[in-house]
């Protein structure tokens, strides 16, 4: 979905800061516009994860342009990929050495988890995210 994003620059610091009006209190920053776009995606993902909300419809561009928040800034329309909201479990085929698989299985069993649940939880922790409620069989 394409959302209007209000972008500001500060002459005293490099880069860009942005607010996403359709997600109240959702702010981010980036040194480049490319980094800012990636950070907008991440900010929306974290916002919706924490709030457990469905994404709102994007505000009309005219409404955002006329807002007080848009004064002294630029309004860009950025694509936010909502595929992260799809929670259906899907099979994934990976390859690893047998001794690694065995170590994973031992650690999962010790925690009363399936291999799939253990690997998902471990990957999310490594990515700095909370658990994703994995369901699966080892």
Image: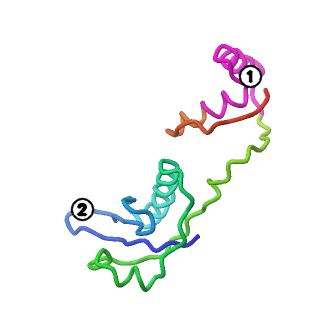
Looking at the image, residue 138 lies above or below residue 12: above
Read off the residue under disc 2: 13
Tell which of 24 and 32 is nearer to you: 24
Q: Position of residue 101 (x, y in %)?
A: 74, 22
Image coordinates of residue 105 in percent, x first then y, are 72, 19
Q: Specify whether 128 is left or right of 115.
A: left
- Residue lying farthest left? 12
Q: Residue at x 48, y 47 (%)?
A: 50
Kindly state the secondary structure of the residue where label 2 is placed.
strand
Q: Is residue 42 magenta?
A: no
Q: Is the C terminus in the top left, top right, bottom left or bottom right quadrant? A: top right
Q: Which mark is residue 101?
A: 1
Number of residues whose C-alpha sits closer than 10 Å to that of mark 2, classed few (under 14), some (14–19) or many (20 or more): few
Disc sitting over residue 42 in the figure: none
Q: Is 107 a magenta residue?
A: yes
- Quick one: SS at disc 1? helix
Q: Which residues are magenta?
A: 95-121
Relative side of 83 to 16, left or right: right
What residue is at 28 percent from the left and 79 percent from the top? 71
């Amino acid at each position: 979905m394409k959302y209007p994003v209000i972008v500001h620059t500060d002459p005293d610091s490099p880069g860009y800061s942005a607010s996403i009006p359709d997600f109240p209190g959702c702010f981010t920053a980036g040194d480049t516009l490319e980094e800012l776009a990636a950070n907008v995606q991440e900010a929306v993902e974290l916002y919706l994860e924490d709030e457990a909300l469905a994404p709102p419809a994007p505000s009309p561009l005219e409404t955002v342009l006329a807002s007080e928040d848009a004064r002294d800034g630029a309004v860009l329309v950025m694509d936010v990929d909502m595929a992260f909201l799809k929670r259906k479990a899907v099979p994934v085929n990976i390859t690893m050495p047998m001794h690694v698989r065995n170590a994973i299985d031992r650690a999962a069993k010790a925690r009363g988890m399936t291999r799939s649940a253990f690997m998902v939880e471990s990957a999310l922790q490594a990515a700095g995210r909370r658990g994703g409620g994995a369901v699966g069989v080892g």
